[in-house]
Image (cartoon, helix red, strand yellow):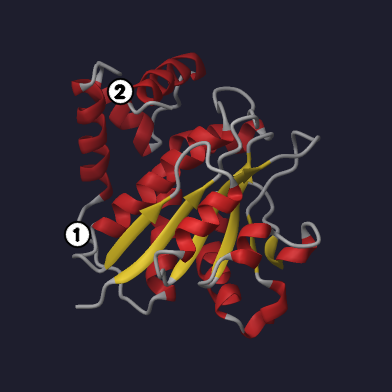
Amino acid sequence: MSNHRVYISASTQSENIGVGAYGTEQSRMMYLADRIKYWLGTQSGKYTVFRNSPGWTLQQTVNDCNALNCELFIDNHSNADSSPRTGGSEAFYYHQGGTTSNSYRLAKEIYKRIAPLSPGADRGVLPDNAYVSSLYVIQQTTPPAALIEHFFHSNPVEVNDYLTHIDGYAKETAKGVAAFCGELWTETVAQIQTIEMLVDEMIKDGIVSNRDHWIGVLKGTITPVPAYLQVAFSQATKKIGW
């Protein structure tokens, strides 16, 4: 059985605050990365997933990845703009390698799966020097790397949509990893099962109490009250030390 060594990084930009109930980019992307790891873990032991930690510098994250002989590296972010109407997903690849590189292929496999999820007009798969002169994590990691801007945390519509569909972003990103690795995706856990397990854990930890309501919120059939969502997320992050 193949075992792919995968590095799932998340933004450590705790100073970036999103609109509404979003909170910080670091806390949201760390949670997303953990859910990507969860979904890869449903694939019968095909992946060993490594993670960075909150508060790490970019150099610490890159050094950790490079020491672990990983097959690929993904850095997860949410974007921002001065206009609350700017939205969409975008993915960046190693520009020196061009569109024949594994970095481009990795970025494309993820982008084509997450782009349909964000309500905004999506922005494409771009070379890293289209953002700035270059993106450090893409330039310095040893394995093929991609940086993903999943949506805009400055856009209220995209934030509200993301908060009700977080696991969709996580699962589709994991599917992109599988495609890059040449592995077929196997549905071993139905989405409703993982949602129910997550809510049951939240109830056990005293974070929420109304099981049916929060299952509906995570399924996207119930629009959450932002104030309640903020309280629940605050309690959850305290449990894991963020």
Q: Quadrant of residue 71?
A: bottom left
Residue 43 x %, y %: 24, 64
Residue 8 x %, y %: 44, 55
Which quarter of the figure is the N terminus placed in? Answer: bottom left
Q: Is residue 125 above or below residue 28?
A: below
Q: Is residue 111 above or below residue 18?
A: below
Give the spatial CA distance, label 1 vs label 2: 25 Å
Residue at 69% of width from left, 34% of height from top? 154
**Is 89 on the left-hand or right-hand side of 241?**
right
Q: Amino acid at mark 2?
A: His
Q: Amino acid at mark 1?
A: Thr
**Is 227 on the left-hand or right-hand side of 197?**
right
Secondary structure of the residue carrying tag 2 is helix
Residue at 57% of width from left, 70% of height from top? 108
Is 122 in front, or is 44?
A: 44
User: Badge 2, how many Cα within 10 Å: few under 14, some, many 20+?
Assistant: some
Note whether residue 222 is visible: yes
Q: Earlier in the sequence, mark 1 or mark 2?
A: 1
Residue at 32% of width from left, 76% of height from top? 183
Q: Quadrant of residue 158?
A: top right
Residue at 46% of width from left, 61% of height from top? 65
Residue 4 x %, y %: 33, 71
- Residue placed under numbered mark 2 in the picture: 213
Q: Is residue 205 above or below residue 147?
A: above
- Residue placed under numbered mark 1 in the picture: 188
Is 104 in front, or is 115?
A: 104
**Is 61 on the left-hand or right-hand side of 19?**
left
Which quarter of the figure is the C terminus placed in? Answer: top left
